[in-house]
Amino acid sequence: MLWSGCSPCCSPLVAARPCRRGKAARAGVPSSASRATKTINLGYRDSSVPFSFMGPDQKPAGYSVDLCNRVADDLKRDLQMPDLAVKWTLVTVESRVASVQNGTIDLECGSTTNTLSRQAQVTSASPPS
């Protein structure tokens, strides 16, 4: 699922699997996977400033990272899973889409451009109106 929070061409969130209806659906995280593992796996880039980068505290930082943290907080509430853990995984330009496709990450929090070829690889959607 592609959710464009910054402009029509930049994606802070990319997800591959279909999901349930409601607020959690906008995040692109299938509730069954989250419930089973009690973990949401978020991918980040370490050099995509200002969207996603390694902060001075050696933790993921940036606009898209902040957005993903808010999505994770919403999922904790919507799925009634206050113990839902957030796991951050470093991805590269080359690995980000494949990592979503193969389930290594649930969401990619970076600056991925929404293109037709990427829409063919991952599920995409517009932000809620």
Image (cartoon, rainbow, N blue to C red):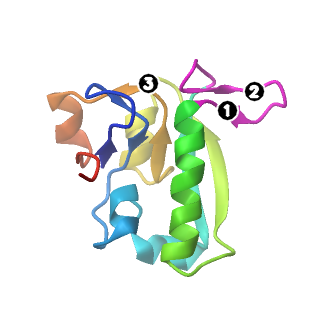
Residue at 55 percent across and 81 percent down: it is: 80
**Mark 2 and mark 1: Cα distance apart in space:** 5 Å
| Residue 100 percent location from the top left of the image | 41, 46
Q: Secondary structure at mark 1?
A: strand
Q: Nearer the viewer, residue 15 or 8?
A: 8
Q: How many marks?
A: 3
- Residue at which label 3 appears: 94
Please tell me how crowded label 3 is: few (under 14), some (14-19), or many (20+) other residues with Cα within 10 Å: few
Label 2 vs 3, first from the N-terminus:
2
Q: Local crowd at mark 1 within 10 Å, few (<14), some, or many (≥20)? A: many
Q: Amino acid at mark 1?
A: Ala
Q: Which residue is mark 2?
A: 55
Q: Residue 79: image x %, image y %?
A: 50, 78
Q: Nearer the viewer, residue 92 or 6?
A: 6
Q: CA distance from mark 3 to mark 1?
A: 20 Å
Residue found 40% across the figure and 57% down from its top:
27
The image quarter in which residue 57 lies: top right
Disc 1 designates what residue?
Answer: 61
Which tag, 3 or 1, sits closer to the chain's start?
A: 1
Residue sitting at the far front: 129
Residue range highlighted in magenta: 46-62
Type of amino acid under label 2: Gly
Q: Is residue 64 left or right of residue 12?
A: right
Horizontally, residue 96 falls left or right of residue 37, namely left
Report, in whole angstroms, how far the alpha carbon at label 2 lies from the one at label 3: 22 Å
Say which amino acid is labelled 3.
Glu
Secondary element at image label 3 = loop
Quarter location, residue 122: top left
